[in-house]
């Protein structure tokens, strides 16, 4: 079986990481995978901000997320991963969210191929689009006119879980001509 299919079948969300940092070579592979993703009309509007664990903006985002949700979960939104990639894109382009989704999946599969764990993160969207939106856009150095789309935490897994299963009878409809 092709390596990409193996990565798809074996990948699951990682919700616990070792403190070991990604190497620069690993990070470059992930960035290349994300930026290599196809975009509508070849717009190439995806921008990736790399944030290392310990950067104060992560704690700010976590606090804002919790304040807006009215709760404080046991784990932070990135589960202590050593690296979080924030994908932003042109807000005026109608396909930016789809393009970011494709890019983040490329990153997740590349991480799996490198033996890394990842978890795709959408739970901070309200925090990054809320009252402190401009502060976070500036702190994450989003280009002018760009907004948060999705994020992904990546690192060496300390916890693992089985990939999810699915029921094709429930999840697939076939229309014959």
Image: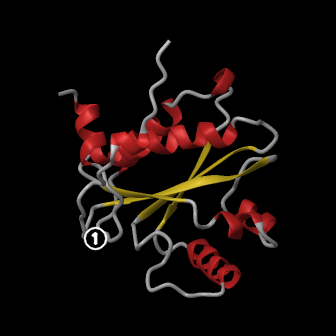
Judge by depth and name the residue closer to the eye, 137 or 130. Answer: 130
Q: Is residue 88 left or right of residue 5?
A: right
Residue 22 spot, x, y in % from top left: 34, 57
Say above or below: 64 vs 2.
below
Q: How many marks?
A: 1
Query: Residue lying farthest left?
Result: 1
Residue for point 66% across, 63% down: 125
Q: Is residue 144 left or right of residue 52?
A: right
Q: How would you rate the neighbour count of disc 1 (Cα within 10 Å): few for under 14, some for 14-19, many for 20 or more?
A: few
Q: How is the image coloured?
A: secondary structure
Residue 118 spot, x, y in % from top left: 37, 57
**Which element is circle 1 on?**
loop
Say above or below: 102 vs 111.
above
Name which quarter of the figure residue 123 lies in.
bottom right
Residue 48 spot, x, y in % from top left: 58, 47
Residue for point 49% across, 39% down: 34
Residue 43 spot, x, y in % from top left: 68, 27
Q: Is residue 1 left or right of residue 101?
A: left
Residue at mark 1: 18
Name which quarter of the figure residue 122 lies in.
bottom right
Residue for point 23% across, 59% down: 162
Say above or below: 137 vs 143.
below
Residue for point 64% across, 30% down: 44
Image quarter hosting the N terminus? top left
């Amino acid at each position: 079986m092709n390596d990409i299919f193996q990565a798809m079948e074996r990948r699951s969300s990682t919700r616990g990481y070792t403190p070991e940092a990604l190497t620069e070579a690993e990070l470059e592979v992930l960035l290349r995978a994300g930026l290599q993703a196809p975009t509508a009309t070849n717009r190439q509007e995806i921008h990736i901000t790399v944030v290392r664990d310990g950067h104060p903006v992560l704690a700010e985002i976590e606090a804002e997320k919790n304040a807006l949700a009215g709760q404080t979960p046991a784990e932070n939104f990135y589960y202590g991963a050593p690296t979080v990639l924030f994908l932003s894109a042109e807000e005026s382009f109608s396909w930016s969210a789809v393009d970011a989704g494709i890019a983040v999946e490329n990153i997740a599969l590349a991480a799996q191929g490198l033996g890394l764990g990842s978890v795709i993160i959408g739970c901070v969207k309200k925090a990054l689009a809320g009252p402190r939106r401009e502060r976070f856009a500036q702190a994450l150095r989003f280009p002018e006119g760009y907004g948060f789309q999705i994020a992904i935490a990546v690192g060496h897994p300390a916890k693992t879980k089985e990939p999810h299963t699915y029921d094709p009878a429930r999840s697939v409809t076939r229309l014959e001509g």
